[in-house]
Structures are given as C-alpha cells and as structure tokens.
Image (spheres, helix red, strand yellow):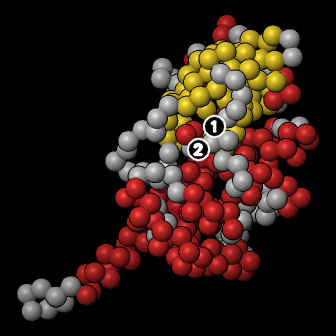
Amino acid sequence: MDFNFSDEQKMFRDTVYRYGKEEIAPLCEEADLKGEFSYEIWNKFSQMGLLGLPFPEELGGQGADIVTCCLAGEALGHAGVDGGSLLAMGAHTYLCAADIFTFGNEEQKKKYVPRLASGEWIGCMALTEPSCGSDAAALRTTAVKKGDKYILNGSKTFITNAPVADVCVAFATLDRTKKHEGIAAFIVEKDFPGYSTGQPFHKMGCKVSSTSEVFFEDCEVPEENLLGGEGQGWQIALTGVEWDRSTLLSPMLGAAIYNLELCAKYANERYAFKRP
C-alpha cells in the first residue's frame, strides 16, 4: 500500500496552508480575545470551499476524500488557525452536513447540503445529554409521532455550534425499551416551534467555538425531516462520530507542528548567558 500523498494532495495542502496563514490566522487572536464565534473567520472558510470538502460538486462541495480532508485540517492548524474555529468547522461539516449527505433522501440533500457546504447555514449535531455522552443508547430525549409530525422533548448539552446553528441533526428515542434500535435522527431547523438553545458556555480554551445546551419543548418536526428511518439513529450517530474522530486530530497535529516551529525559532533567537 502506498502511503505517499499525491502531487494534487500536496498542492492542495500547501495552498490551504498559505491561505490559512495569510487570510485566517491574522484574525484569530482578536477572535479568541472576544471569546465568541467569528463570522469573519467562518466566511474565510467558506470562500476557500473548506466547509464542503467531502461533498460532490453538484451539491456545492469539492469531492475530497477523507485523506484530503485531514490534510486540510493539518494545514490550517499548522498555519496558526485557532482550535475553536477548527472545532466549529469540524462539527459543522463532519457531524451535521455529513450525516445529512450520507443518510438523507434526495430532497433533504438538495435542500440542506448546498447551504451547509457554502457556509450560508451553520450546522450542529445534538447527541450528548446531561446524563449520557458516549452511551448514546441511554439518551432521554423522546420523539412521539403525532399525525404528520414528530414531537420532541428533552435537552442536550455541550453541543458545538448550537448557539449559532441554523440546522441541527438531533437524536431522540421513539421507544426506550428497544435501546439502540429505538433511536431516530431528525433534521431540526432553528425556527421550528419548541426548539431553543442556552447561553454559550464560558470555556478556558477553544473560545471561538460556541457551545451550549439545546432544548426541545414539544418541538414540532415535520415527518419529512426524519433522517434515514425510524430506528436508524444509532447508525447515523456512529457514522457522524466516525467522520468527526477521523478528522479531529489532523488540526491538532498541525497545531503541534506550528508550536514546535515557534519554540525552535525562539530557542535559536534567544540570547542568554552570552550565547544564543
């Protein structure tokens, strides 16, 4: 197996690195000091097509494979783009938009993916609850079918992008006795009745990543916004998390390289005890 990157991948990585260093990194210190989501940085991601990397061109994406997506993340981290902005991008692309692209029907994909890929809409995925995180089968948010709608009740926490999201892929149980097989996923728009978010959490790091609780209080979701089928939510959740975990470490690797280079530069320039 050849583990070398193609010339096209190397060129793309270098292009993203230069763009990140010249266009995005200079904005990051001020954004971090403000401690809030930066639409200016978001628009920079959008202009480079970074929010829709894995999606086909006909849906507004770039058709990149998973390795190329990781290279983009590494390049941005290496360029000095802050972790909060990269976390926001990852949750948007790989948790929300990727779930809709992978499991959505044609109407859902045409409605949501192009707007998410362009950055016009911001996405989040609401899985974690106050009483369960990785144990998604224990979630307490419920969904009940009433006529042509599903009624959702419950709450989520630590949801990346929630305060600024236009679209949320939310998970709820239709039948708790079925455990994993009773979970369903729904595409919830921010204006749906009964949907709301809490105040952004104050964090020590990743401040540009806006994170909060999500509340469903008799939230009305049209039946056409069921993602996949009833009982398919567990599979959808695992697929989204797989995408996210596969791409999450690449920006951190880039950031480690960035910091190593800064330290080496400082060590070589610092003059102490009459020598560098």
Q: Is residue 218 above or below residue 213?
A: above
Q: Which residue is mark 2?
A: 164
Q: Is residue 18 above or below residue 150?
A: below
Q: Position of residue 269 (x, y in %)?
A: 25, 87
Q: Nearer the viewer, residue 32 or 230?
A: 32
Residue at the extreme left of the image, as rendered: 273
The reply to whether callout 1 and callout 2 are in contact (CB within 8 Å) is no
Q: Quadrant of residue 142?
A: top right
Q: Quadrant of residue 177?
A: top right
Q: Is residue 130 above or below residue 262?
A: above
Asked whether residue 172 appears in the rendered view, the answer is no
Q: Nearer the viewer, residue 275 or 152?
A: 152
Question: Quarter of the image containing the C terminus?
Answer: bottom left
Q: CA distance from mark 1 to mark 2?
A: 12 Å
Asked whether residue 191 appears in the rendered view, the answer is yes
Q: What numbered label is drawn on residue 125? A: 1
Q: Say which amino acid is labelled 1.
A: Met
